[in-house]
Image (cartoon, rainbow, N blue to C red):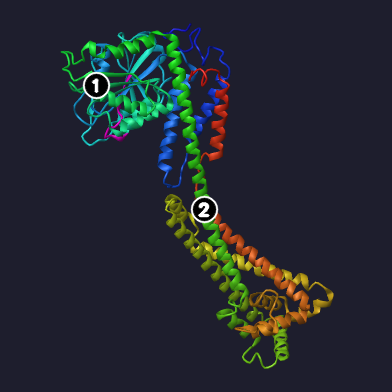
Amino acid sequence: MVTPGTPPGAPGRSNGICGPAAPGVLAATTALEGLEARLGLVDLPYALPGAAEAAARAARVADQLGDYILPRLASIDAPLLAVVGGSTGAGKSTLVSSLIRRRVAAASAIRPTTRRPLLLHAPADEPWFASDRVLGSLARVRVPEDAPPSAPITTADGEAPASWRELEVRSCRELPPGLALLDAPDVDSVVDENRELAATLLASADLWVFVTTAARYADAVPWQHLRAAAERDIVVAVVLDRVPAGAAADVEADLRRRLASAGLATSPVIAIPETPLDAEGLLPVPLIAPLRDWLTTLAADAEARRGVARRTLAGALGSALAQIELLADELDAQARERHELAEAAFAAHAEAAQRINAACADGSMLRGEVLARWQEYIGASGMLRGLETQVGRVRDRLSAALRGRPGPAQRVEDAIESSLATLIVAEAQRASIVTERAWQRAGTAAPALEAARAALPGQEALTERATALVHEWQEGLLGLVRAEGADKRLTARLISLGVNGVGVALMIVVFAHTGGLTGGEVGIAGGTALIAQRLLEAVFGDQAMRAMAERARIDLDARVHALVNERASFLASALRQPSPMGPELRQAARAAASALEATSGVTEEGRS
């Protein structure tokens, strides 16, 4: 049998639940370490209602895995750690000192009082507590056994001192091997860090000695911890301190009723009447004898210690896995929020592309500068006085372009480029504003919104990008004209009119209506567009003209969609992906649970 004084790594050390070769312990440890690593990387970037609690949950479970579950899984025969916790002013430090009959824990009437938690162990058990095997998240401060109690650290403003994540460790010859005591901060302290530390310590306990008073035993905060203890199936002893004379029976009966309701009906209750302390500031021996005897008996029975350790370990594992499932649910909600925010960006930019498409197909582009330059180009002051005359006039002007006067056609191209680029810039910026407002309404992604604002290319860069897009589209359209005119039957006709002039006419048709206008569709600028259509029909024929217009329209639409999708993707890239993903965390938890099921004694023996 392994004795409590056998340190980790010594011959005969129990490495697992049932002995040195306990099946599955290594696999379970590896799975739990992987789970701990994932919890340490949890990122919940969106300010959803449950995000703050989920982040705290991740930290708590990670601490519990590292501080208690993994060490206890590896060393089931290690000494039991009894954490003495409870309400403010309940007398925890006095009780700890009274149990070993000398002052080791300083008490103070000043509130709030913050000090290092104190861990006391038997000299023979020192190897178990010399390292960070247990409560590894706390820095160790080793204090000589006979040193006076460490003075309380008082804070007038409620701020925690720099030492609040330290653990004071002392050897104590009065303690029996197999049992360590830990004096913890108040669970209901007004200092946030104190409450967090108390919760961390209670989550790392093999058993609790919960201290309350006759005046405060019904307070809400301590019962939150007691109900959590019941859920974890941890062994709890309750000390009811400062019971007024004549009130013991009634108060103890009510406390037992509450304990039964919380699932702790079998927990021992030790009532300590209101009594003066002795000259050393300790409680009289007869009053604390029942608790000391209970602890000493437990420490002396190796099998009882293992039973407590297995029971608490099984409960802690079950609680941790349940907490991880809740965390995975929050990660799912975070992923949904990111998806919805990204969808808002893509939807706004898809609408921008649709508006650009509509403006390019309904004649809206054939207004203002574009219309003026086209009319100038074809000399359309009396454009409807005879279509054939107009077509002939356009032919003459296009032919003249080949004789060194390309200026008018180029001005039409430039006007189209400028107007279309302006439209694209306006709609892209509008989509960005719509996205920004959607994210502001959601109120969950302020950091992402700020990052997107800072990094999104400004108007100058967007204008350059849009202008380049239109220019490339125009070049592609001219290439389409050249390719279509490669037929020998069309070459002479195309040469006589000029590629640029025919290209300009094709642009006008594209902006008039997809596939060209019909006779009844002459509206605003319809007459001039009809001239361009008739010209193209004269060069290429009706079917080819319509096919070219459709291809040019599709090409423009694709380029516009690429630009706005690029903008939407840029905005969406500011949305951090929650980490890890919910399914990934669940899979890791299931792997750990499966490995633990293969480890004999964790659940079955632990709860037997």
Q: Nearer the viewer, residue 558 or 23?
A: 23
Badge 2 marks a residue whose secondary structure is helix
- The kind of residue on which mark 1 rests is Ala
> Does the magenta-highlighted stretch encompass residue 186?
yes
Q: In the rendered image of this protein, does residue 583 appear above or below residue 441?
A: above
The picture quadrant where one finds residue 59 is: top left
User: According to the image, label 1 marks what residue?
Assistant: 249
Q: Is residue 457 left or right of residue 384?
A: left
The picture quadrant where one finds residue 125 is: top left
User: According to the image, label 2 marks what residue?
Assistant: 340
- The kind of residue on which mark 2 rests is Glu
Q: Is residue 536 left or right of residue 418?
A: right
> Does the magenta-highlighted stretch encompass residue 394?
no
The percent coordinates of residue 37 (x first, y second) are: 50, 31
Q: Nearer the viewer, residue 171 or 310?
A: 310
Q: Is residue 575 left or right of residue 410?
A: left
- Mark before the other along the chain sequence, 2 or 1: 1
The percent coordinates of residue 62 (x first, y second) are: 45, 30
Residue at mark 2 to residue at mark 1: CA–CA distance:
60 Å
Q: Residues within 10 Å of mark 1 (few under 14, many from 20)?
A: few
Residue drawn at point x = 60 percent, y = 71 percent: 358
Badge 1 marks a residue whose secondary structure is helix
Which one is in front in this view, the residue at disc 2 or the one at disc 1? 1
Q: Magenta part of the protein: which range?
A: 182-192
The percent coordinates of residue 472 (x first, y second) are: 64, 66
Q: Is residue 477 left or right of residue 351?
A: right
Instruction: Specify whether residue 607 is in view.
Output: yes
Q: In the rendered image of this protein, does residue 234 appear above or below residue 438?
A: above
Q: Residues within 10 Å of mark 2 (few under 14, many from 20)?
A: some
Q: Nearer the viewer, residue 75 or 242?
A: 242
